[in-house]
Image (cartoon, rainbow, N blue to C red):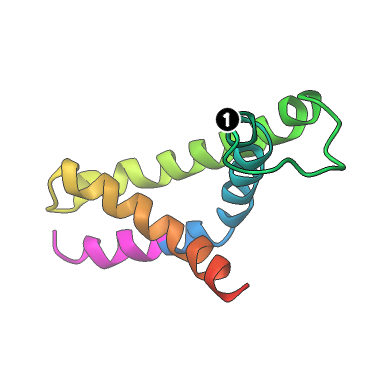
Amino acid sequence: MRKWLPTAVGVNLLLGIPGVVPVWLLSYFAVNWPLAAIGWTQREPTENDGMLPWLLLGGPVVALFALLWLLANRPLRRRTALDPRLYWPVSVLMTLVPSITLMIVL
């Protein structure tokens, strides 16, 4: 049971590398629409395409990554000795590590 914990951490770190794209898409969406609407950020001045690109491109990319992440983590969760209330937040955090690192570096 213990040998699966490093595997789960490694799988989530590796999933975080392509996960940079959906995280960036979600942050770009949040900055340009809901956060700009309440006045916390300013919209990108050239962003005037509306919601259609998000429905055609952003939604499927985020949904595909979420499905891939879930399908990779469900079997690993059953094999680790961690409590589910601890496993899922740690998995999300490990997946976000490459995105957070990239934001800090840039």
Front residue of 93/50: it is: 50
| Residue ranking furthest to the bottom | 105
Location of residue 35 (image quadrant):
top right
32 to the left or right of 102 = right
- Find residue 30 and report its horizontal and vertical position in percent: 60, 38
Identify which residue is drawn at 23% across, 61% down: 4
For the image shown, how many numbered marks are present on the structure? 1
What segment is highlighted magenta in the picture? 1-12
Residue drawn at x 20%, y 66% as measured from the top left = 3
Q: Position of residue 79 (x, y in %)?
A: 20, 50
Q: Quadrant of the N terminus?
A: bottom left
Q: Nearer the viewer, residue 45 or 66?
A: 45
Three-letter code, disc 1: Ile
Q: Position of residue 68 (x, y in %)?
A: 50, 42
**Could you tell me which residue is drawn at 55 percent across and 62 percent down?**
17
Left or right of 11? Residue 28 is right
Q: Quadrant of the C terminus?
A: bottom right
Residue 74 located left or right of residue 46:
left
- Identify the residue under disc 1: 38
For residue 18: magenta?
no
